[in-house]
């Protein structure tokens, strides 16, 4: 009996048809077939794969497209310009700090005098220029006929360039304007190469008083022999 039952089960297994392939197994089979193509199908799949590759486009022999040479870098010029600007800014900052420290270290009376000097400087320089131009000529950027120096409480007009406040040997005429407590004081300190001490006091700080004193200085310089002839030459 057991043997007969076994034979019947074996016959049923052999005669039973195999189940159809499920939808889940199809993609696996498809991927397997793609990875291992049949020799007969290789001629069809290879062109499709080659079509997807990117190929470099070669220029035609007759085309005008040329590779332009690489332009030189301007980084060196930019760096030098930035370095120069930074240097100038640092110099101006140092000068401003030095002036601020000096101003803060001054006493109250000295600060008032310093502020008065800065306020009156444009007036004094303009008056000196108006007097010096008819005597020695007009100043230009490339040629200076006269020079004006200022420091603390005085302005100096001279017909030669000075190294600071040190008089040069070629200097012939120089005029000094001092800032007093209540007025200007005009002094001719050099006339035609000779030392002078001709003082003219102003009554106040007005422009009219200063111009009147400088007109007197101008007349003295003009009547002095050889005081203006050297400046009017070439």
Image (cartoon, rainbow, N blue to C red):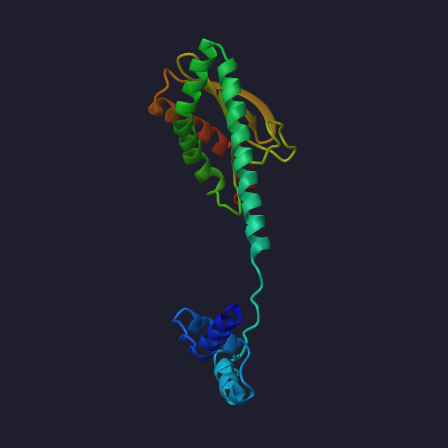
At 39% across and 71% down in the image, what residue appears? 22
Outermost residue toward the front in this view: 1
Residue 26 picture quarter: bottom left
Q: Nearer the viewer, residue 77 or 124?
A: 77
Residue at the extreme right:
169
Q: Is residue 178 left or right of residue 77?
A: left
Task: Tell which of 24 and 199 is nearer to you.
Answer: 24
- In the image, residue 104 sits, relative to residue 151, either above or below, namely above
Q: Name the side, left or right, on which 49 lies relative to 80.
A: left
Give the x, y percent position of residue 16: 42, 77
Q: Is residue 5 above or below residue 198?
A: below
Of the pair 145 and 61, the residue shown nearer to us:
61
Query: Residue at (57%, 44%) from the top-left corner?
Result: 83
Taking 180 as reference, is 7 above or below it? below
The relative height of residue 153 versus residue 130 in the rendered view (above or below) is above
Q: Position of residue 113 (x, y in %)?
A: 44, 15
The one of 74 and 64 positioned closer to us in this rendering:
64
How many marks on residues? 0
Residue 190 visible in the shown view: yes
Query: Residue 97: percent from the left, percent from the top?
Result: 52, 25
Q: Is residue 198 visible?
A: no
Residue 220 placement (x, y as % from top left):
48, 28
179 to the left or right of 86? left
* Picture residue at 54% right of the left edge, 86% below the top: 42
């Amino acid at each position: 009996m057991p043997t007969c039952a076994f034979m019947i089960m074996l016959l049923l297994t052999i005669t039973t048809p195999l189940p159809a392939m499920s939808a889940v197994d199809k993609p696996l089979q498809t991927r397997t077939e793609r990875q291992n193509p049949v020799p007969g199908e290789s001629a069809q799949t290879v062109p499709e794969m080659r079509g997807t590759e990117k190929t470099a486009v070669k220029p035609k022999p007759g085309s005008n497209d040329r590779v332009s040479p690489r332009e030189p870098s301007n980084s060196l010029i930019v760096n030098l310009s930035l370095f120069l600007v930074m240097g100038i800014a640092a110099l101006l900052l140092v000068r401003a700090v030095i002036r601020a420290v000096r101003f803060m270290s001054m006493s109250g009376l000295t600060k008032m005098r310093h502020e008065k000097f800065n306020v009156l400087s444009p007036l004094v320089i303009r008056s000196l220029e108006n007097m010096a131009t008819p005597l020695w000529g007009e100043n230009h950027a490339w040629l200076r006929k006269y020079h004006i120096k200022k420091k603390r409480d005085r302005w100096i007009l001279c017909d030669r360039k000075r190294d600071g406040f040190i008089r040069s040997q070629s200097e012939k005429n120089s005029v000094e304007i001092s800032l007093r407590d209540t007025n200007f004081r005009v002094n001719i300190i050099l006339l035609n190469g000779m030392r002078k001490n001709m003082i003219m006091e102003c009554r106040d700080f007005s422009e009219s008083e200063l111009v009147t004193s400088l007109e007197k200085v101008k007349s003295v310089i003009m009547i002095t022999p050889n005081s203006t002839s050297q400046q009017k030459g070439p």
